[in-house]
Amino acid sequence: MVIEDTLFILWLMVAGPLWAAVGLFVLPGINHGRAEADQFSPTTLKIAGLIGGFALGPIGVGLFFFEPALIRRTSLTLGVVLTVFISSQVLVRVIDPNFPSALWLLLAGPLWAALAAYFIPRHYRDLEADDQNALTAAALGGFAIGPLIFGLMWKTTPKINRDWMITLGALGAWQIYALFAIQNPTNPCVALPFAATYLTQQTANGVVIGCIYSLMAVGLTLIYSVQGVVSFAHGQLYMVGGYFSFYFLEHASYHLSELTGSDISVNPIWGIPVAAFIVFIMGALFERVFLKPMHEGLIERVSEYAILITFGFGFFLEYTTLAVAGPFPQKTDRFIQIRRFTLDRYHFNDEFFFGPIHIIGDRAFAMVVGIVLIFALLYFLQRSWTGRALRATSQDRQAAAVTGINPTNMNTLSFAMGSMLAAMSGAALIPIFNWVPWVGAEMVGRSYVIVVLGGLGSVPGALAGGIIVGIVEALGAGCHPDPSRGAAYKEAFALVIFALVLLLKPTGLFGREQH
Amino acid sequence: MMIFRRFESAIDQGIGRRKLGYLVLVLVVLFFLWFPNDASQSNYTKTVFISGFFYAIMSSSWALLAGIAGQFSFGHMAFMGIGAYAAGLIARDGITFAMLGLSIGPETISAFGAIIIGTIAAGAVGLVIGWLLLRLRAAYLALFTIAFSELFRIMMLTEYDYTGGSNGLSLRPLLQIEDVDAARQVEYYLMFGLLIVCLFALYRVANSPIGLFLRAMREDEDAASALGVNVVRYKILVFVFTSMIVGFAGAIFYSDVGSERIIPEQLEILQMSLIIAYAVIGGMESLIGAAAGAFISRYLLEAMRQVVITLPFGMTTYDGSDAFVWEPGYWRFALFGVVMVFTLRYMRNGLLYPIITWFSERDIAMKETVSRRESDDDHAARIEADDE
Amino acid sequence: MKRITLLVSVAALLAMIAMLPLSAVQADGHCEFAEDSIKIGGLVPLSAPGAVAGGVAMSWAINRAADDINAACGVSIDSVNYAVEIVIGDSEGSPERGQAVVERFILEDEVQAVTGVYHSAVGLATMGMLDENGIPTVFSEPWNDNVSANGIMEYDGRPPRNADGVDYVFRVSPASSMVGGVVVDWLLDLGVGNVVIIAENTDYGQPAAADELARFEAAGATVTQINVELGTEDFVPILSRIQAQAETPDVIRVLVTGETSYNLTQQMAELGIAPSDDTICVTNQVAFQSEQYWQNVPDGNYCAFNRVGIIPSLFSDTAVELNAAYFEEFEDIVPSYAMASYDAVWIIADGMARAGSSSDGAAIVAAIETTDLDLSQGRYYFEYGNHNPDLPQGTPAFMWHQWPDPVVTMMQYFEQGQSSLDAAVIFPEVYQTHGSGYIAPGTSP
């Protein structure tokens, strides 16, 4: 571990400003009423505290506290020295393009974000202003514009609306983009004229795969909204869904070919209802035996039990599948016989062009399947009696029970339907990715990201979350300045967003407050 | 049954169950102390035992964190990894402060020094994570720690220039003993000693006033807070404490005691899930139970790689051999999953709970949760009323 | 104590499972076997994170070899027939587990020889222990250059030997330098200048990528290396990035194994990046498993791959038989590591028979050094060993106890759904089956 110039930079960007802030706020306050300090106006004291704290840290603040006589001259000298020193140092470092940007991204940005996230919401609460989104805005702002956010939000305490958030978020995203550009100017994300095509292509990749991801996440969110349980078996249910579809198609194709004497390959679309049916029953049985007692008060510490029991179920499913199906990768036939859809290249003039954009055919089809199923689910939830009953149970169990809905049945239904959706997305994806028994583990991690991002319990949120995760992964892998790492970190980009959302806004972008 | 009752009352009138419990405990410790001296035991069995001790530490410290304090973390393996990786990196590269012209070369850092630095690193990260997790509960906490541990694993895997990627990172060997048998002997006692020390430390915390606060926090955080328990402080404390324990154990285990290098695969969620399963089967609320659960499960999973059942009375199988040979392969993990699920549902306090309760003369877990149970009953009654 | 606990617990657990698959021990009528048998340990990965599919195939091949040897009345030592008994150990692909299993092999199972090993890391970690304990060992799949010549780091022109003057470790799989060289030579012959290497970030992918990268750059080609995590499913963003490169790559080289490599190759083909008119697709050797390959990579026609082991058109009778048996079991073409594992058991058995002992390690090693056997992969012999200790200047140290002739070829599919037995061998020229060094997409030789 080599800590080279970092100490200096840390001081410049973190400790210095911190002590400056201490000097700024503390010095006028503690000197108030002291005879030797009264000769200075509060503004002088503030400026002196700012400069002294920045240059000498605690020593400066202490010095000005004990020897106010020195304030004016020392702060002036320090101010001049500091300005020259810092500007020269910054200039030296700006010449090396990698240094400051990487450091900002890794250290100073997050640190300012953390500081802002810690102090600004408190300030809002002290002023009795609406602090609902202050945390998120402060963190985003701290990351994007560093200490300036204090000036912006501390002084004016604006009401944080959607525009604020979008502006700050865009600013942060733009900054990351700019940093990528500085670090690697040949990065396809920034190198014109191809960048527009490239960004569109990557965004399209993200949207397509994101819609597919959402279908699985919707199941998770449905279970959570009714039961308040995060299913840790979801990935394995997705995996067995794929296997059920695979074995069904294999047998159906074989028997149909035997029967008719010609070579018939059943379209994998038929695997989806089969997998859905089997896993629906599996889910219902599991819920009845293991989760129902939980709602009957037979079990202590319900949330912990729910995590463990679903987790154990997943563990069992994964190894049973491994023992039965073996470790060899499997895949079904494709949905449609079109390899890819291509949007051709258009030239606007000699310099600038757009395209081509490619989308893999089967993926596009799976995306359509995903969207259709999600909208069918939404329709079911909005229009049918059972769907409304489900929603009612998720909003208020007692009230729902009063109107004659049986919450126990709704619990079972929600778990079975959620599992079914996982299995359906498994069956929809086995023509696209090849299938091994541990395929669920990676996928379910993504689903957690999606549901938390979209807000646990919100179906449209899961769709939006899926698309966001898809885009983030595509752009992350596509735009990371180091192509070799970008690919290896693909999963990590979504995880970072996930951790941030959990910390900053656990209700997600579309979620309702926890009940 | 009658015999058992009679035996029970005899014990009660004699030395008393609690004392007998201590006696059994001492016997078990003595057995483990004697074990490596049994010439008929191979080094392989010792290796299995050494890793059993390590996982017992992991499991029992997780039991303190999750079972007693209710902080359902999936990041335990990651903290262990932080300890091991930090120790390895420090021992390999040293530390350089270029600005201060100060450099601590790797040669000045001893193996034990590196382990201590690893422990501190794990504790420091535990502090930050514990602080970040203050706002999160139950499923959210579990999800966050999954993300944290996956991120850590991916970083260790990808930054191979520093961490050695999937080749792993060697730590500085703690022991330098040439002779293989003698080395294994020392490693065995070192790991066993570490287990005893860790269990003792965990036990002290769990049975101090802090332990009480932790339990109160687990049952109802808001109520505990209202009653004056400093929730923030204890939550962070328990994170730092368990992180340091596993960081320490990890750094020692991978300093060529149990294994010569730490590899990122060790940090996979699968490995973490095994630790959780061990703790659940042994009993999440009992430190000894979790440790024993881990040790026994590991031993059985190892022994069940090939199961040979010799038939009695000279019976033979249809092909003439006198034993069934079964290689369960993945079925043993599937079975493990079944055991875990049923343990959770029907013996929530672990398979070893009846034994531990019997010896301790009282129903530990029950007492604590009586009040909770009562309020749950109210809740259940309400739900039933709703159902009708 | 141990036995009783085990028996009781296991009996209880067994009662819980209704299904109990029993493996029948093959008894054979026509041979008289001695009371005790020869034990050979097979160290293979059978659990994650190891390469389970590879381990299953190797374990099958090792057992198959033992069955075949026993069907031929076992190993005859002093005109007594000894049956061969296989003990399989699961390395889980981890060095630490591998060491523990080898320790168990030696101390508990008391094996007389060891074969197998898929992951190089496991080979490197275990070979010292095997050597010190005097266990004759024939590794059948680790590729790392440092595997066979024990302690290559200390190598100073002197054969690596133990105190007793014997080195116990042999290898019948190629060293990775032997393989990487062939792929790069072939591509340089075709005149590629712009190479993209996609490598998994494991102890297989990274050293192999570094080796090939150095070779390409020495020849003046530009190389972009992209690392991916094993288990990644969606490669489209990464492939779009390659597509967006200013210069279209001449070749994409896949150094990714297992199902991840299938996903990558299929998506590459679906996007039309490679194989295409501009870009050659060189996929991983797992493509040789043609049934699996076509199931998982239906668009992978015209992809080339490197193949270790004898080319199908030169399959010996043993190889054809083995392939048929493998096909019956796994419905696929037999992979090279299964063939090598099968042969390794035969080499050990033959060595024991010629040494006239199953326990004198040094004598067995001496006998194996003078092996001359025709098995499934061709003729086996070891050029350098105690029988011929002087490696000429310039010969790499790993040639010590190394089978010098693993055939490394480049193969290419040219018809949809083609069996790898019919695929074209395109490099080196001496083995070419269709008279062509590269079959351009859309053409046929």
Image (cartoon, coloured by chain):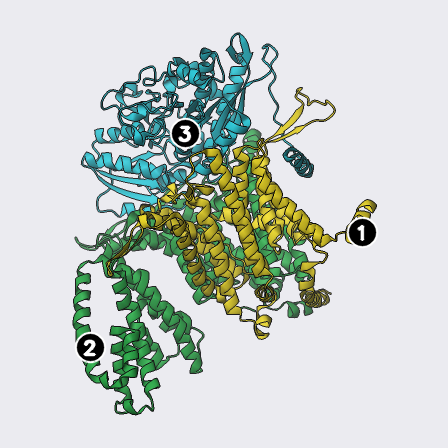
Residue A236 visible to an observer of this rendering: no
- Pointers 2 and 1 within a single chain: no
- Viewed as shown, does residue B341 lie left or right of C51? right
Please, what is the three-letter code of the amino acid marked with disc 2? Gly
- Viewed as shown, does residue B220 lie left or right of C293? right
Count residues near mark 3 (Cα–Cα under 10 Å), then give few for <14, some for 14-19, many for 20+. many
Q: Colour of chain A?
A: green
Please, what is the three-letter code of the amino acid marked with disc 3? Met
Give A36 or A414, whichever is nearer the viewer. Answer: A36
Task: Specify the label residue A79 is tagged with.
Answer: 2
**CA distance separating discs 2 and 1:** 85 Å
Count residues near mark 2 (Cα–Cα under 10 Å), then give few for <14, some for 14-19, many for 20+. some
From the top left corner, tell me how far across and down residue A255 is, in percent: 57, 32
Residue at 67%, 66% in the rendered image: B372
From the top left corner, tell me how far across and down residue C100 is, in percent: 49, 35
From the top left corner, tell me how far across and down residue A206 is, in percent: 38, 53
Q: Colour of chain B?
A: yellow
Q: Which residue is mark 3?
A: C127
Q: Colour of chain C?
A: cyan
